[in-house]
Amino acid sequence: MTNSFVRNNNFYFKLSTFPSVFSGRGKTGSKSLLLLVGFVFISFASLAQDAVVKASVDSTRIKIGEQLLYTVTVETNSTNLVVFPEGETFNPMEVVESLSTDTTRLGDRFQLIREYALTQFDSGSYTIPRQEVLINDTPFYTDSISIEVADVVVDTTKQKMYAIKPPMEVPSGLNIPAWLWWVLGLLALGGLIYFLLRRRRKKQEAEKQLPPYERALFELQQLDKSHLLEKRETKEYYSKLTEAVRRYLEDEVHLRAMESTTSELIYDLELRMKNGELKLSRETIDDLKIILQRADLAKFANSRPDIITAKEDRSKIEHVIIDTKAAIPEPTEEELLKDEEYRQEQLRKKKRRKITLAVVGSLAVIAIAATILVSTQGFSSLRNIVLGNPTNELLQGEWITSDYGEPAVAITTPRVLKRGEIEMTEEAKAMLVGNETFIDGDLDEELYVVLSTVRFQQGVKFELETAVDGIYSNLEQKGARNIVVKEEEFTTLEGANGIRVFGTLDMGDPETGNSNTKEYQILNFAERGGFQQITVIIDEGDQFAEEIANRIINSVEFQNTEN
């Protein structure tokens, strides 16, 4: 028996489930078949009434990049599960946004609306394909829709074409050059080292500023806290112990105790006793002698006294220091005066050392910063920082926009142009109604700007190319040599057409006799029955001056220009 399927709107019935109907013959079989077909069509009609799926768009014609709204509407029973299309099913249209589903109750049924924002970035005719909507796993399909995507028409008669602007550096919110980070890092490192050294020096100076007696006792206390005996570092222990007493004797008794051997130091003390300069007991000197000898054995012969002996020696050294303090006679007034002078001299030396250290440190930081700046930015950057740069100051200063001459030429400059005059033959003057000239700077300066406007008599024929051809001879008359001339068409932002002449030239310095290479730009226009010329001459290689010149040239415009 063959399995057959009947499909309507993607709804399937398996006809083999009715074998008795198809196996019969005659009238009985025919009647059964008609009943089955009727049943199938009734079922399809019931399903068709159960769900309604349709799609629409708010516009079938859009411009490139414009969005249209594609809406899918489904009406079905509230018990049915509906799955809307997602993903790339809308190709060749692009889905900008898929909005959330809006649900509305219609009696015992629901109306579900899903909207999609679609677009296309190429012009042409496109078709939104049929979209599949699943209702309880049964697919329903919308109709395909044709869309026209049109180009955006630009009216060049109304929208003027502008010249391409030169690239400009966009300043950031906080523009810190790389070399400055190096300087800041070195300064921070130097500051940390200086802080640590100063902290250590202050600690040492605080110990040195104590009177000899108090310092000696302080050093013995520090020795007790060092735990050298517990670590069995006997050599280090005796070194610090004898160093404390030797330094005290050198500072307080004025002996060369730090450099003397044990026998030499004991001999000097005994000599001071005989001369009556010290009133020490024999026992104190003998104790000191024994301790110093034991320390010599510990330091040079690897002798290791036991902990009890070492602690007794520490106690005896403290008594030696106390006895010595008591044995020293009171200083005379003359000795006190000498001590004060010595102290003041030491303070002056200390102050001079601080000043010297500060100056040397500052010079070192400046030298490091200068080296980094020269290596990263070039020597000119260092020169500009130290000596300043006039053109950089002009560039960073406040610029002025003003109108000059007739017809009015609007131009932005770092300084106001002042009225001046240009030499002109009588024959040329006879052809003119009027002329005006405005100048800033001079040819031997870093920036020279000239703006001239000329108005001709009625009927005078003027050709812009003729005036441009005469620029070379005019530059020679001003003393220029080795003139390189280039020429191109120029259009202002508002559409005024002219000719730009540019290049380099050598200009002699009357004071030094040397020759300076300069760059020049000359704009030439023939607007409203006249001739207008804007000249900008700068020093070659000056990046700030070059930026000034380009900014001036690009700012030129004519007020009320008639095209």
Image (cartoon, helix red, strand yellow):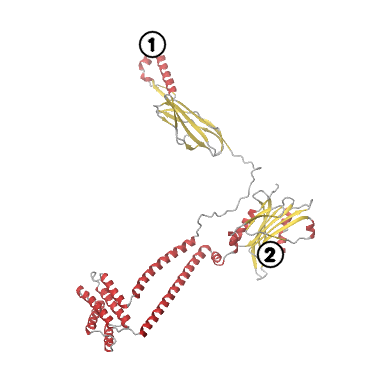
Q: Is residue 391 visible?
A: yes
Q: Quadrant of the N terminus?
A: top left
Marks 1 and 2, how far apart in space?
A: 120 Å
Image x and y of residue 350, in percent: 41, 76
The local secondary structure at tag 1 comes to: helix
Query: Which mark's residue is nearer the viewer, 1 or 2?
Result: 2
Along the line of sight, which residue is nearer the eye, 313 or 235?
313
Residue 92 appearing in the image: no
393 or 375: nearer the viewer:
393
Describe residue 274's horizontal placement relative to residue 126 as left or right.
left
Amino acid carrying mark 1 in the image: Thr
**Would you say 176 lies left or right of 278 here?**
right
Q: Which callout, 1 or 2, points at the residue further toward the start of the chain?
A: 1
Picture disc at residue 511: none
User: What number is the disc on residue 28?
Assistant: 1
Residue occupied by mark 2: 481
**Image coords of residue 533 (percent x, y):** 70, 56
Q: Residue furthest bottom?
A: 275
**SS at circle 2:** strand
Identify which amino acid the numbered label 2 is placed on. Answer: Arg
Q: Is residue 142 left or right of residue 268?
A: right
